[in-house]
Amino acid sequence: MRYLDEYRDPRLAAVLLERLRGVATRPWRLMEVCGGQTHTIVRQGIDELLPAGIRMIHGPGCPVCVTPLETLDRAMAIAARPGTLFTSFGDMLRVPGSHTDLLALRARGCDVRVVYSPMDAVELARRHPDRHVVFLAVGFETTAPANAMAVLRAAGLGLANFSLLVSHVLVPPAMTAVLDAPGCRVQAFLAAGHVCAVMGWTQYLPLVARYRVPVVVTGFEPLDLLEGILMAVTQLEQGRAEVENQYARAVRREGNTAAQEAVRRVFRVADQAWRGVGTIAGSGLVLAEEYAAFDAARRFDVGRLVVRERAECIAGAVLTGTKVPTDCGAYGTACTPRTPLGAPMVSSEGTCAAYYSAGRSAAPEDEGAVP
């Protein structure tokens, strides 16, 4: 397939691996902060092909996985209300809450629908003025512009029956939290190309200056990731700490300024809880006060929520890279994609799902985990 096969060429992969072997003289630990990159790394076996001593640590790069359990339980409480038409992207439907999931609610007769864009939800609100339409707005900086545009569109149409249940998270504060964690041994980051396509890459400059860690903006295909790893290791070997852009075919320094402006109009930065991780200061987006009428969390009083995580699930440790999925006693037995205990096993970007689909049954010594 043109413009895709070129980035999966095994001959070029072998060249990059050989160059990496020639550059690396000591062990290094790199973290990718993107679930899509994690899936490519695991599915293609890139982590197993790297020179001895170079380890990939899988970070909190799955937005579905880090959506707070309280938000999911609130979503289900709202979806179960009569007269509500609840919408979401498909990857949220099977994410387990404390007691159930959205797919099970739909099976019980609740009006839960999969949409392909938040604009689809706005259109549903326009077509069904007698129903209140809620869209579950989750994700990193990549999905925030579309959700902002949905609010602006609904406001322009005067739709009083549309709202968002927001759980937006931001990447740089999460990287900062990783670096500040006790015992952290992450020495460089691969930054998600789609986030930087929206936000540009200058947002990483303060982090690089403060922590002296290289950040390489990287794409999602095998050759993208191998080149990104080579660039990061080269910086480490040379004692440099800079932001470099491997994904130049899609990412510009300034990003998409129109998308950024839409986000600034509709959202404000706030502290945000991350499932399995905890609250990270300044790591989320909430609706600005002038758009509070579109905030489903304010509109619907669902009462006091008592959340309940599964004790046997180690999703938090997997999300922060301190453990890998095969460290979990429930992995592949009590926890599978059909019977997930946590979001990382069911999400299309989850690390546990990546390991399971790749048939990983035992973790190579020291793989990914940060002691």
Image: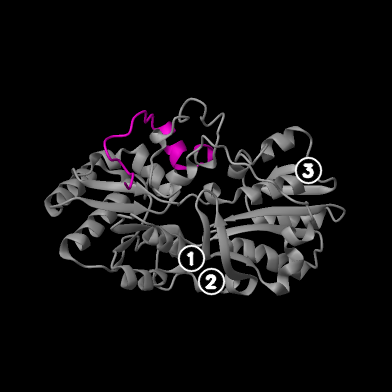
Quarter assignment of residue 137: bottom right
Quarter assignment of residue 167: bottom right
Residue 80's disc is 3
165 up-or-down from 210: above or below? above
What colouring method underlies this structural image?
A: one colour
Distance (Cα) linking label 2 and label 1: 7 Å
Would you say the magenta stretch is mainly helix, strand or loop? loop
Q: Earlier in the sequence, mark 3 or mark 1?
A: 3
User: Is 71 placed left or right of 350 in the picture?
Assistant: right
Label 2 residue SS: helix
As shown in the figure, which amino acid type bears the numbered disc 3? Ala
Q: Which residues are magenta?
A: 345-371
The residue under the point 26% across, 68% down is 241
User: Is 310 placed left or right of 234 in the picture?
Assistant: right
Question: Could you tell me if the residues under marks 2 and 1 are in contact, i.e. CB atoms within 8 Å?
Answer: yes
Question: Where is mark 2, residue-wise?
Answer: 260
Foreground label between 3 and 1? 3
Label 1 residue SS: helix
Report crowding for label 3: few under 14, some 14 to 19, many 20 or more residues within 10 A (C-alpha).
Answer: many
Quarter holding the N terminus is: top left
Residue 56's disc is none
The residue under the point 45% across, 58% down is 194
Seen from the viewer's position, the closer of residues 224 and 331 is 331
Q: Position of residue 139 (x, y in %)?
A: 55, 55
Quarter assignment of residue 160: bottom right
Q: Earlier in the sequence, mark 2 or mark 3?
A: 3
Question: Where is mark 1, residue-wise?
Answer: 198
Question: Could you tell me if the residues under marks 2 and 3 are in contact, i.e. CB atoms within 8 Å?
Answer: no
